[in-house]
Image (cartoon, rainbow, N blue to C red):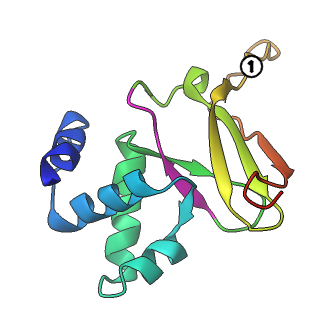
Amino acid sequence: MNEREENKLKKRKVKPTAIRILVLRYLMELKTATSLIDLENHFEKSDRSTLFRTLKTFESKGIIHKIDDGTGITKYALCLESCNCQPADQHFHFHCEKCNQTYCLTELNVPQIDLPTNFSMLQANLVIKGVCANCN
């Protein structure tokens, strides 16, 4: 069972430690984005700094992306296999005002924006707020 996770980590040049495999497996099972607090609650026996470092490593290697959904709590979600963490790979997110869950809308890419001369986009944060299908 660890083989799938180990391969995903190795593909992104991340050493597959036990906690990294467990965190990756947890993220792969989720349908929504998660926060460091959610991870701490799920992995009660792991310390906060280990989980935070794992998230930061995953983010720097393009395994996950960070989401600012306007709640004041940073959320994280898996990147698609084809993601190179470039502006063209960015997509919309949906935040449910009822259940407080944030979903990746990977089928809706951020449109190309013609910025003024000498401006370059590093990241776009496009969050749609409303009520999800589960709460509707």
Residue at the location (72% across, 58% down)?
134
Residue 45 lies within the magenta run = no
**Which residue is pictured at 31% across the width and 57% down the height?**
25
Viewed as shown, does residue 75 lie left or right of 118? left
Q: Nearer the viewer, residue 131 or 115?
A: 131
Give the class, few, some or many, for how many residues have Cα within 10 Å of label 1's Cα (few <14, many ≥20): few
Between 97 and 17, the one lying in front of the other is 97
Q: Quadrant of residue 135?
A: bottom right
The segment highlighted magenta reads 74-81
Read off the residue under disc 1. Answer: 111
Counting from the top left corner in percent of width and height, residue 6 is at 16, 47
Q: Is residue 121 visible?
A: no
Amino acid of disc 1: Pro
Say whether residue 46 is left or right of residue 79.
left
Q: Position of residue 30 (x, y in %)?
A: 47, 56
Q: Quadrant of the C terminus?
A: bottom right
Classify 119 as above or below 64: above
Is 38 on the left or on the right of 25, as rendered?
Answer: right
Q: Nearer the viewer, residue 9 or 101?
A: 101
Q: Position of residue 55 (x, y in %)?
A: 40, 59
